[in-house]
C-alpha cells in the first residue's frame, strides 16, 4: 500500500518537474492571454479613468473640513450608515462625501465603493460619460463585481452592460437580444411606445469614436435605449406578449424591420443545465447589431479572497480557428454538433473568456492547446503553471 502511494507521489512529482522544465525552456510561451485588442476595439474605451480610489472625494477639501457634522445622520450606527450608502448611486455617494468631513470619512471607509473605485474606475468613468451614473446603486454594482458568471449563461462574463448593470460574455453580448441597444424612434415602433413612454426609459449618450462594428465612427449626440428596458415597458403598456406583437405589426411596415422586431421581442435562448449555448442550433440570420459594444465595457471580477480576474483567452482556440479549413473531419465532429454551423462555434470559442480554474479544465481537451503543447502532461490533480499568463 505504502509502495503504491509512494509510486503515485513520485509520478506526480515527475509530472510537475516536467512542467517546470518546459516552462523554463520556453519562457515566451503561454497558452493563455489577456483580452485581445481586436475585441477591445468593439467596446467603450476609457483612456483616462481616475487614478485614485478617492475619485472626486478630495475636491473642495477646505470646505469639507469646515463642516464637522452630518446632522441627524450622526445618530445612525456605522452599520446602518454603510447600508444607506450602498443604496445610493455613485454620483450621490460622491456628493455625500463633499458635504462634510464625517461624510467624506464614511465614504472613504465604505468597502463597496472603494472596491469599485479601486478595481473598476474605468467603469465608473464610463457610467458618468454615457449619462447613466445615477442608474445603479453602489451595492448592486459591487455585487456584480463580486461575481464572475454572465447574467444570461454559465460562462465567464468579462464585460459589463451599462444600461442594466449586468455582467455578460461575448457570445451573449453578440446574440442575446436583451443586450442590444436601439435608437429611440425605432424602439417606439418595435415596442409600441409613445414619446411620453420614452421619457421613462434611461437614455445612453454614446461616447463618440470608433467601435469596430462599422467603418464609420459613432456620431456625435447619438442617444440609445436598451432593448431590455424598452421591452419591459412595452409589456407593461400593452399587457401581454401577443398584444405587444400586434402593436409592432401596426407600426412596422417594412419586412426587414418586422423581422428585426420579432427577434428583439423574442425571449433569449436558454440552455438546459450542462448545455453550452454556443453548441445549440443557430437562430438563423440575425439582424446586424449596428450599436454593438457602445454600451459595454470590460469589467473585472473580484473573488472572495481579493483576487482580480479579467478572464483568460485560449491560444489553442485561436489556432483551431485559424486552421478551421484544415481540421480533420473527426476533430471537427468532436468539437461541433452536426446541426450547428462550425465557423460560428470556432469563433465563439476563440472569443470566450474563462476564469483561471475553467481555463485549466478547458486546455485538457482543447485540440489547439494540445497542438501547441503536446508534451505537457494531463490529469485530474496536476497544476499547469504554463497555462496561466505570468503575473497571476
Image (cartoon, helix red, strand yellow):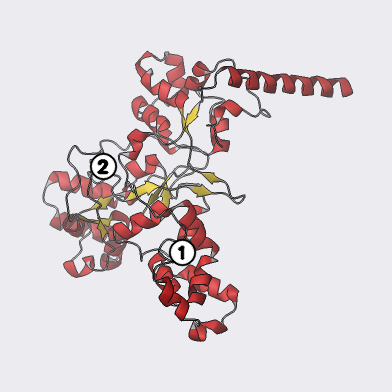
Name the residue located 28 percent from the left edge and 48 percent from the top edge: 294
Name the residue located 17 percent from the left edge and 67 percent from the top edge: 195
391 over 146 or under it: above or below: above
Q: CA distance from mark 1 to mark 2?
A: 28 Å
Is any part of residue 65 visible from this angle? yes
In the displayed structure image, the side of residue 81 where residue 220 appears, left or right:
left
378 over 91 or under it: above or below: above
Residue 385 lies, in percent from the top left, at: 60, 28
Mark sitting earlier along the chain (1/2)? 1
Tell me if label 1 and label 2 are in contact, CB under 8 Å: no
Residue 204 is labelled as none
Q: Which residue is mark 1?
A: 138
Residue 32 lies, in percent from the top left, at: 49, 29
The quarter of the picture where the N terminus appears is top right
In the displayed structure image, the side of residue 116 where residue 341 appears, left or right:
left
Query: Within the image, what quadrant is residue 189 found in?
Result: bottom left
Q: Which residue is mark 2?
A: 211
Of the pair 295 and 320, the residue shown nearer to us: 295
Residue 364 lies, in percent from the top left, at: 57, 25
Query: Within the image, what quadrant is residue 18 found in?
Result: top right
Name the residue located 19 percent from the left edge and 37 percent from the top edge: 215
Regarding mark 1 in the picture, which secondary structure is present there?
helix
Regarding mark 2 in the picture, which secondary structure is present there?
loop
In the displayed structure image, the side of residue 239 where residue 65 appears, left or right:
right
Amino acid at each position: 500500500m505504502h509502495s503504491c502511494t509512494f509510486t503515485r507521489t513520485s509520478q506526480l512529482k515527475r509530472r510537475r518537474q516536467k512542467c517546470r522544465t518546459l516552462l523554463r525552456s520556453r519562457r515566451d510561451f503561454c497558452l493563455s492571454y489577456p483580452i485581445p485588442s481586436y475585441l477591445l476595439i468593439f467596446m467603450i474605451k476609457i483612456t483616462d479613468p481616475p487614478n485614485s480610489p478617492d475619485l472626486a472625494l478630495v475636491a473642495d477639501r477646505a470646505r469639507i473640513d469646515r463642516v464637522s457634522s452630518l446632522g441627524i445622520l450622526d445618530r445612525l450606527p456605522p452599520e446602518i450608515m454603510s447600508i444607506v450608502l450602498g443604496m445610493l448611486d455613485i454620483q450621490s455617494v460622491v456628493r455625500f462625501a463633499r458635504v462634510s468631513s464625517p461624510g467624506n470619512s464614511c465614504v472613504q471607509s465604505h468597502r463597496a465603493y472603494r472596491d469599485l473605485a479601486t478595481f473598476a474606475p474605468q467603469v465608473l468613468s464610463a457610467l458618468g460619460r454615457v449619462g447613466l451614473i445615477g442608474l445603479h446603486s453602489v451595492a448592486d454594482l459591487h455585487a456584480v463585481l463580486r461575481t464572475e458568471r454572465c447574467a444570461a449563461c454559465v460562462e465567464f462574463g468579462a464585460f459589463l452592460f451599462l444600461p442594466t448593470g449586468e455582467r455578460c460574455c461575448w457570445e451573449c453580448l453578440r446574440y442575446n437580444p436583451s443586450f442590444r441597444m436601439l435608437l429611440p424612434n425605432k424602439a417606439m415602433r418595435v415596442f409600441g411606445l409613445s414619446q411620453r413612454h420614452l421619457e421613462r426609459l434611461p437614455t445612453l449618450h454614446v461616447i463618440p469614436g470608433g467601435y469596430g462594428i462599422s467603418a464609420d465612427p459613432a456620431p456625435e449626440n447619438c442617444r440609445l435605449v436598451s432593448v431590455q428596458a424598452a421591452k419591459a415597458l412595452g409589456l407593461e403598456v400593452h399587457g401581454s406578449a401577443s398584444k405587444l406583437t400586434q402593436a409592432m405589426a401596426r407600426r412596422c411596415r417594412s419586412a426587414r424591420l418586422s423581422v428585426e422586431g420579432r427577434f428583439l421581442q423574442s425571449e433569449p435562448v436558454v440552455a438546459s443545465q450542462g448545455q453550452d449555448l454556443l453548441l445549440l442550433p443557430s437562430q438563423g440570420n440575425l439582424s446586424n447589431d449596428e450599436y454593438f459594444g457602445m454600451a459595454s465595457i470590460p469589467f473585472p471580477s473580484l473573488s472572495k479572497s481579493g483576487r482580480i480576474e479579467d478572464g483568460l483567452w485560449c491560444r489553442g482556440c485561436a489556432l483551431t480557428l485559424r486552421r478551421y479549413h484544415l481540421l480533420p473531419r473527426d476533430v471537427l465532429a468532436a468539437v461541433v454538433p452536426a446541426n450547428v454551423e462550425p465557423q460560428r462555434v470556432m469563433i465563439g470559442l476563440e472569443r470566450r473568456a474563462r476564469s483561471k480554474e475553467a481555463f485549466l479544465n478547458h486546455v485538457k481537451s482543447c485540440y489547439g492547446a494540445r497542438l501547441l503543447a503536446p508534451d505537457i502532461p494531463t490529469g485530474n490533480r496536476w497544476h499547469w503553471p504554463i497555462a496561466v499568463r505570468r503575473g497571476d
